[in-house]
């Protein structure tokens, strides 16, 4: 009997609770409130030891910077918008900005965006699908 394929997070900070909506989890320093996505023995900002605690982060934020990509790997449709977003309440993530024309006249720095969770196009060799995230303009 084979195991049933499952949905896996594409990044370790993407959490998929059973029976609930996925979310992004960071490590928030209890001393200075800085947010990180990788484990540290001390806070890289304020150097307080043992102060980083798991924290559910916001699904909304503001576009910090973007790049319109016109050339990519074979099979990747171009142009697309690669973006860095500052999440409301702390944390900075990179992903693609979707549901917007890849035209600088239609994209504004600081525009309000939200995270969209979706299943990635690729599967692993066992047939498992991956949950990914992207950003889209907030309505």
Image: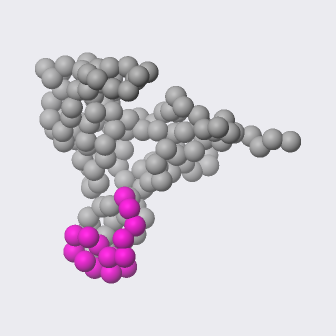
Residue 22 x, y percent position in the rendering: 50, 45
Q: Quadrant of the C terminus?
A: top left
Above or below: residue 47 compared with residue 119:
below
Whether residue 105 can be seen here: yes
Q: Quadrant of the N terminus?
A: top right
Residue at screen point 32% across, 76% down: 42
Residue at screen point 61% across, 46% down: 19
* Prevalent SS, magenta region: loop
Residue 105 figure quarter = top left
Residue 103 x, y percent position in the rendering: 19, 19
Above or below: residue 84 compared with residue 138:
below
Number of numbered discs on residues: 0
Q: Is residue 1 left or right of residue 92?
A: right
Q: How is the image coloured?
A: one colour
Which region shows up in magenta?
Answer: 37-51
Near-viewer residue (33 or 71): 71
Residue, far front: 74
Would residue 40 be counted in the magenta stretch?
yes
Residue at screen point 50% across, 32% down: 120
Would residue 41 be counted in the magenta stretch?
yes
Residue 51 x, y percent position in the rendering: 34, 76
Whether residue 138 can be seen here: no
């Amino acid at each position: 009997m084979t195991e049933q394929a499952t949905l896996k997070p594409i990044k370790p900070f993407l959490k998929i609770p059973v029976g609930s909506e996925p979310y992004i989890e960071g490590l928030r320093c209890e001393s200075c409130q800085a947010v990180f996505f990788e484990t540290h023995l001390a806070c890289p900002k304020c150097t307080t030891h043992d102060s980083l605690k798991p924290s559910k982060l916001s699904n909304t934020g503001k576009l910090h910077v973007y790049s319109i990509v016109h050339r990519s790997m074979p099979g990747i449709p171009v142009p697309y918008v690669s973006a860095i977003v500052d999440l409301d309440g702390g944390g900075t993530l990179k992903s693609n900005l979707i549901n917007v024309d890849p035209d600088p006249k239609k994209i504004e720095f600081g525009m309000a965006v939200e995270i969209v969770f979706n299943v990635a196009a690729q599967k692993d060799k066992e047939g498992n699908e991956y949950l990914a995230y992207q950003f889209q303009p907030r309505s």
